[in-house]
Amino acid sequence: MFYHFFFHSILICFNVADEAHKNDLAFRRFRCQLFHSSIVAVLDSLKLHMTVPAVTLCPDGHFHWVIYGLGPYIADYPEQVLLTGVVQGWCPR
């Protein structure tokens, strides 16, 4: 729940700032770096479990070496656009 609120508040800040600085290259780079740094900070505690194998008892009753990974990430459309870096509201005419 906290992470959803965290990402939602970042999206709101980006949308408000977009209007004032939409043509400022330095601000766009800052915004991108802020988002990626935030993702790194949130997921940093999972890094060890995604790189070092752990012995885990599986449902079949046997112990196996396991490296955990992240599953699919579900987001609404504005968040998907932000995550993929797609430009929106721009026409190539």
Image (spheres, rainbow, N blue to C red):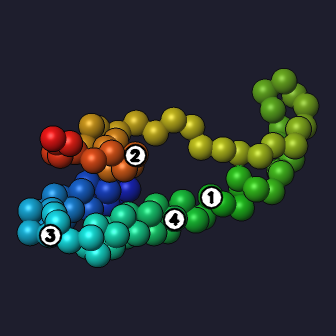
Position of the C terminus, as image quadrant, is top left
Q: Position of residue 11 (x, y in %)?
A: 24, 56
Query: From the viewer's perspective, is 36 left or right of 48?
Result: left
Q: Earlier in the sequence, mark 3 or mark 2?
A: 3
Label 4 SS: helix
- Which circle, 3 or 1, is nearer the viewer? 3
CB contact under 8 Å: marks 3 and 2: no
| Residue matched to label 3 | 21
| Residue matched to label 4 | 40
Residue sitting nearer the eye, 56 or 41: 41
Alpha-carbon span between mark 4 and mark 2: 16 Å
Tell me the crowding category of disc 3: few under 14, some 14 to 19, or many 20 or more residues within 10 angstroms, Cα based.
few
Looking at the image, residue 85 lies above or below residue 75: below
What amino acid type should be assigned to the residue bearing mark 4? Val
Alpha-carbon span between mark 4 and mark 3: 25 Å
| Residue matched to label 1 | 46
Furthest-left residue in this view: 20
Alpha-carbon span between mark 1 and mark 2: 22 Å
Query: From the viewer's perspective, is 58 left or right of 14?
Result: right
What amino acid type should be assigned to the residue bearing mark 1? Leu
Q: Which mark is residue 84?
A: 2
Residue 79 visible, this angle: no
Label 2 SS: helix
Q: Position of residue 81 (x, y in %)?
A: 31, 44
Q: Position of residue 56 (x, y in %)?
A: 82, 43
What amino acid type should be assigned to the residue bearing mark 3? His
- Which circle, 1 or 2, is nearer the viewer? 2
